[in-house]
Image: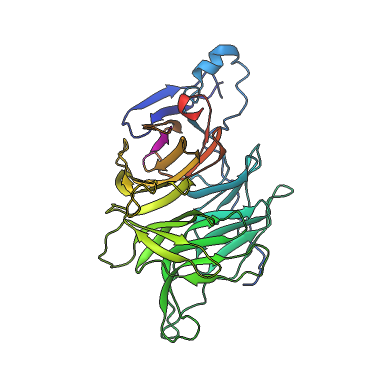
Amino acid sequence: MKRLQIWRALVASVPLVVTLGAASCADAGEERSPADLPGPAPNVVPDAGAAADAACDGDACAASSPCADTDFCPVATGPDPRWTLTAVWGSSKDDVWAVGSRGTILHWDGAAWTATPSGTQQTLFAIAGTGPGDVWAFSSRGVVLRSTGFAAGTATWTAAPPVAPTYAQYPPQVHSESLLLSAWAGGSGELWTAGEPYPVVPDGESRPTPMNLWRRAKAGAPVAWDHDVIGSSVAIRGLWGDVADGVWAVGGTSGAALQRAGRTFHATVTAGAPTWTEIDSQSSTDLHAVWGSSAGDVWAVGDRGAVRHWTNATPRRWAIIDVPTESDLRAVWGSGPSDVWVVGDAGTILHFDGETWTPATATFPLGLIPNLRGVWGSGADDVWIVGDSIVLHATGKAKSAR
């Protein structure tokens, strides 16, 4: 007996939901040993490449597929469907990583997503790497994980040194852990991570300074984190750059600061510490992510549909871009200046073709529309999106995905 699967094809940012019946088609310091994650739960979405029911063949099956006419289709992963995936990154089409709550780390090898043991139950907020054999996952000041890559069906994650020493102002009271919310790796091997401010006492000083950026300047060297501060009372939520042209950091106010929420900073990188300059974002809401195709084409996105574009046409401020959504936007990535993707809350997916921002379509299982939190691709025809209990992959079947 064939099973009935209920789907809906959602045009992101447009409150129209279509329910489809698909009955005819179908019945991811010191080293320590990690502990296994809880075992995978049954899949709640079908693999986009799963075989069709034996009774379904030819054009009739294709016509009834819920992903036939949408830009993105869900792909099965395995872990508990209640967990959230917060970020996605890869080194190639067959080497993609996703991280999330309860220490979830998943890997795509070109055929399937596999859960790898992380050794932590803390939520991981960012993942980046200098290559397939040097991958990093970030949670907080004291929880940084490193892997030499995926091999023989799994990956080993070990604890790297904390980005800053424990700060205890009045022992035994220890300052609360600060979260590491973003990461970026440059082409020459440098690795950057940033997040909430954490008190660090610089060498030769007695009073702490709230640092929110850490970097490892050279791949292959012993792990030692250089610390820096970007603005005061700022939580850095997104990093992107090119060392030749500089690095961008975006975020918002942290704690009880009364300053405007949307903050963007640009650094000129030299042999020493970065020199940060704040640029007017023209945003009163937090910014969550930044990405660019070049030094003169950079995008930043944030709450309440905030989209900002940097072209260096007005060197002291970002341009405000109108887009067809007011949802909070969480991530941005593109393959080039004429192919940019943005994702956010309530299943929001937007695409820029070099001239216009338009909503994209996705197929979601019946239920609460998920918030989408990360996007990355190896190219225009291979784009991944992750979020609340969902992994989506570009189908290549709709015009906006070509």
**x 57%, y 55%: residue:** 186
Q: Determine the image quadrant of residue 371.
A: top left
Q: Is residue 192 left or right of residue 146?
A: left
Find residue 223 and report its horizontal and vertical position in percent: 62, 69
Find residue 358 and report its horizontal and vertical position in percent: 37, 31
Q: Is residue 124 visible?
A: no
Q: In this figure, what is the number of numbered marks?
A: 0
Q: Is residue 85 left or right of residue 134?
A: left
Q: Is residue 142 visible?
A: yes
Decide whether residue 42 is among the magenta residues.
no
Vertical placement of residue 340 versus 58, above or below: below
Find residue 52 and report its horizontal and vertical position in percent: 60, 22
Vertical placement of residue 196 versus 386, above or below: below
* Viewer-side residue, 175 vs 40: 175
Taking the view exactly as shown, the residue that stands out farthest to the left is 258
Q: Is residue 294 left or right of residue 13?
A: right
The region drawn magenta spans: 346-353
Find residue 246 and report its horizontal and vertical position in percent: 48, 57
Taking the view exactly as shown, the residue that stands out farthest to the top is 59
* Viewer-side residue, 27 vs 250: 250
Vertical placement of residue 57 versus 14, above or below: above
Q: Check the picture and name the quadrant holding the N terminus.
A: top right
**x 44%, y 47%: residue:** 296
**x 42%, y 32%: residue:** 366
Q: Determine the image quadrant of residue 42.
A: top right
* Viewer-side residue, 259 vs 313: 313
Q: How is the image coloured?
A: rainbow
Decide whether residue 348 is among the magenta residues.
yes
